DNA sequence: ATTGTAATGTAATAATATTACAATTTTATA
DNA sequence: TATAAAATTGTAATATTATTACATTACAAT
């Protein structure tokens, strides 16, 4: 598998096609199980997000999708994103105002998002113990926890090497 | 101390004036120590942020500040915010695109921001052990950690009661 | 006093996200 | 199968958040 490399868009070696297949397969299953409709637009937006290992912005998605479907408008993308996030298939990276696919959508969502500030790749790592501790800590001061935003910026192993 | 209460702006009892004095005093110290200039604009913006226990948006700040200084433009606010964040006096709440004053600016910044989704108050709680664990965890997979975004949404004790 | 640096003024615009309402498609069921 | 209800998509407009570029002023160091 070859990768296009430039200063702004570094792709580390990775079997991209299979992780896309895997993600879409899981998405189908999750939606079927939850009685949700993974329509062509929604499926395609998910595909586009999966195809990038960087967090991708709504208007980047729009640029790509609009080339395939001239009717697409900002709200087309945001609706699809809302659906995909609601379904747990996509996460918003708040510190980037951008979106990543959730590669373990079928199970828990107690993860930290690792963001490389050099190559801009972003990926999730399980962090359930962190959630447990923070939730416990917050309950100890009578704060009822609902949703945790947990994003770590740094330099990934590929870029450090 | 009396408080104005409405459905959108709940103020829990709190000695606001003293925490404002305290924050400004610390800000002066921090800036002096670091050789930074807390100009009137910067000081006033910090004051406005401190005066709210909710995270406050840049354009909310602009509305208030513009009434006092008709020359104020968006970039006036963003410059002051950049300075205050750089100085460690203010934090951006990424999940709200809004800003809070750091009430322990003189010491460490390893905290979690607790955001009440009912009254919208936001405050920091020390979470150093969480930082240590996450940093250790990320290093164990050769990810070099630089900056952590840690924000917990939920219901505060006042609102739960 | 002079000069370099930092801060502010001013205008324009970019980037991100939402609202409102109409049209169409899908689903459920009469 | 006809049809009503619900969900999805189309379309336009606009709101919200943030930045860039360049001119001017104030400050600090010599």
Image (cartoon, coloured by chain):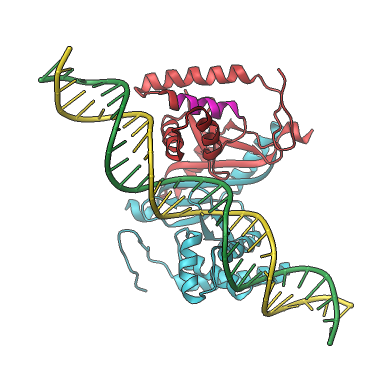
Chain colours: A red, B cyan, C green, D yellow
- Residue for point 45% across, 34% down: A72
State the residue in front, B160 or A31: A31
Q: Is residue B106 left or right of residue A145?
A: right
Type of secondary structure dominating the magenta stretch: helix
Q: Is residue C14 left or right of residue B138?
A: left
For the record, the magenta segment spans A42-52
Residue B20 position in % (x across, y down): 51, 71
The verdict on residue A44 being magenta is yes
* Residue A139 seen in this snapshot: no
Q: Quadrant of the N terminus of chain A?
A: top right
The verdict on residue A38 being magenta is no
- Residue for point 48% across, 59% down: B57
In which quadrant of the rendered view does residue C12 lie?
Answer: bottom right
Q: As displayed, is residue A72 above or below residue C2?
A: above
Residue A25 position in % (x across, y down): 49, 17
State the residue in front, B13 or B78: B78
* Residue B150 seen in this snapshot: yes
- Residue for point 34% across, 54% down: B159
Residue A40 position in % (x across, y down): 43, 23
- Residue for point 38% across, 66% down: B13
Q: Is residue D23 left or right of residue D8?
A: right
């Amino acid at each position: 598998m070859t990768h296009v490399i430039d200063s702004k868009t570094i792709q580390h070696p990775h079997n991209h096609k299979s992780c896309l297949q895997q993600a879409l397969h899981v998405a189908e299953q999750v939606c079927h199980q939850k009685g949700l409709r993974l329509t062509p637009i929604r499926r395609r937006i998910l595909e586009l997000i999966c195809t990038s290992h960087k967090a991708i912005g709504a208007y980047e998605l729009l640029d790509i999708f609009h080339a395939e479907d001239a009717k697409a408008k900002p709200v087309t993308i945001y609706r699809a994103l809302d659906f995909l996030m609601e379904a747990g298939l996509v996460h918003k990276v708040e510190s980037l105002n951008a979106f990543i696919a959730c590669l373990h959508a079928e199970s828990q969502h107690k993860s930290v998002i690792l963001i490389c500030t050099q190559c801009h790749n972003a990926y999730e790592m399980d962090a359930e113990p962190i959630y447990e501790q923070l939730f416990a800590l917050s309950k100890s001061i009578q704060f009822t926890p609902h949703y945790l935003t947990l994003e770590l910026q740094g330099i990934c192993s590929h870029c450090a090497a």
